[in-house]
Image (spheres, rainbow, N blue to C red):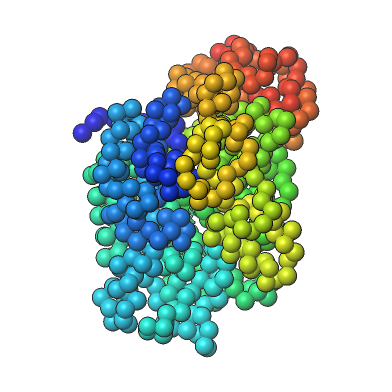
Amino acid sequence: METRNSNWWKESVVYQIYPRSFQDSDGDGQGDLRGIINRLDYLSTLGIDVIWLCPVYDSPNDDNGYDIRDYYRIQEEFGTMDDMLELISAAAERGIRLIMDLVANHTSDEHAWFVESRSAGDSPKRDWYIWKPGHDGQEPTNWESNFGGSAWEYDPVTGEYYLHCFSRKQPDLNWENPEVRENIYSMMEWWIDHGIAGFRIDAITFIKKNQQFPQLESEDGHRYVPLAAASLNQPGILDFLQEMKQQVLAPRNIMTVAESPGVPIEQIHEFVDEQHGVFNMIFQFDHVDLDNKPSAKGVYHPWKLTEFKHALTKWQAETADGGWMALFMENHDHVRSVSKYGHDGEYREVSAKMLAVYYFLMRGTPFIYQGQEIGMTNHYKESISGYRDIESLSFHSRQRELGKPEAEIMDYLALRSRDQGRTPMQWNSGYAAGFTTGEPWIGLNPDYPSVNVEHSLAAQNSILHFYRSLIELRRTHKALIYGDFQEIYTESEQVGGYTRTYQGECWTILCNFTEQRVALTEPLAGEIIVSNTDGHEAGGLKPYEAVISRTAADAE
Ligand code: GLC
């Protein structure tokens, strides 16, 4: 086996691919594996080390592949197992490793396990899922699924209900059953044996359910109550996760990054401590969810820069000793960062570069979501017919039922819908942005004639080349990987900043999050290594300016 530096996952930069929207190679309007293979040279030019590939397993696509029908097959629209193996080896030839999404909280209702489980009350696989009789002629509990509505679906075959934390076509596996766990572990091993370098572990904090299956207290009189209180990061979950670690993860030199909403900061060590934790790193969502308080889903909350910074820097502080974070601004469940935290008009380029600097050089492994590197933006859609995402569609129909005006729902979706990050990758200014020769499965963002890879490669000062130089900078200077993190300008509502210190070097990162010039309270020390403007002027930061400077730590 290839020898790997045991810290390779810390030194890597990851690029996330949402395959349906990345590159189509056969004109059916959906991205596919061959499309990705054809774009590997592009990814290699960008300089990334790892691809996180969102689910490509066989699936009826109720939730775009997060509803898996067969863990051992590739979905027809995406290609074949041969294509998958070719992708793994073609990436490896370019020094790029591949991690896959591991969706183990639930399967599709069309998975053979569920088909068997549902077939009879005494089916040998009955207990592989979570079945309960109704309660007073209603669902077993008043739990609300993450996508809205009851988390229980009635099944006429046996007259019982099954639990689904997400859509009704995503029944939850019963992790209490050791056979289920064994099957998941051997599937993970199978994929690792086929050459993948690790997993992004989907919705893992949902696997443990409160075994009392309690009714939840409704504070607002609503019939259903978000199931988090009984199904998110519940006591006992670590027993399952430690078992997975001992059996599959620990003996192998792989990258593991867990999607783990609901993990409170005090508990982060149990998840990512280098000795005792379970995963290499986790995604936390405080910064991307500031505008969406769980207590009032569907109501957009304005936020302040200090809150945004704190939502990131508190995790930096907490993991300083023996922990590691996954750093990200976007993914397939969130909107475009330049539209949300920067400026997607006049200052699009400079603000996208500023955001890149701000998150990329924190302590952790940076993730770039497809299109982020060219500054792709959100797209306001006038009508629900432009949306494809199951969560957005279900949100729309529930809000309509509650009588919310259409325009208000559209405004909310423009700011929050997962489809904002799922419009096709913009490769050039030709037909369908070079994504497909057919009809794209979801509408393109109309800004593609100016925002696309071809332009970005040709323009020396593009966001794309800026990302390339950041990746190179991080690779060259270990301080930007391993250095201690210290926030500065903590109370500022305009400037975000921090230092990274390591072996006699101190790097300072300063970012202006506004479209005004901002005065600096202290002169910037050291030599300026990077600026995203035409030149830094002492004493202040221009609109959306970011600067990176370096000095010897003891030279002050
Ligand atoms: C994760 C995925 C999301 C999916 C959900 C259910 O949150 O990122 O896209 O809908 O899990 O699998």
Give the side of residue 531 with respect to residue 140, left or right. right
Q: Quadrant of the C terminus?
A: top right
Q: Residue 160: x and y, percent?
A: 42, 82
Q: Residue 366: x and y, percent?
A: 49, 34
Residue 252 in view? no
Q: Residue 491: x and y, percent?
A: 73, 35
In the image, residue 208 sits, relative to residue 489, either above or below, namely below
Q: Quadrant of the N terminus?
A: top left
Give the side of residue 126 with respect to residue 405, left or right. left
Asked whether 491 or 405 is in front, the reply is 405
In the image, residue 49 sits, relative to residue 259, either above or below, namely above
Tell me the residue at 73%/70% (across/down).
403
Asked whether 454 or 274 is in front, the reply is 454
Give the side of residue 256 with respect to residue 447, left or right. left
Tell me the residue at 55%/26% (across/down).
456
**Image quarter of residue 110:** bottom left
Give the side of residue 225 with respect to residue 80, left or right. right
Tell me the residue at 36%/36% (across/down).
37
**Image quarter of residue 180:** bottom left
Tell me the residue at 32%/72% (across/down).
115
Asked whether 444 or 484 is in front, the reply is 444
In the image, residue 469 sits, relative to residue 30, either above or below, namely above
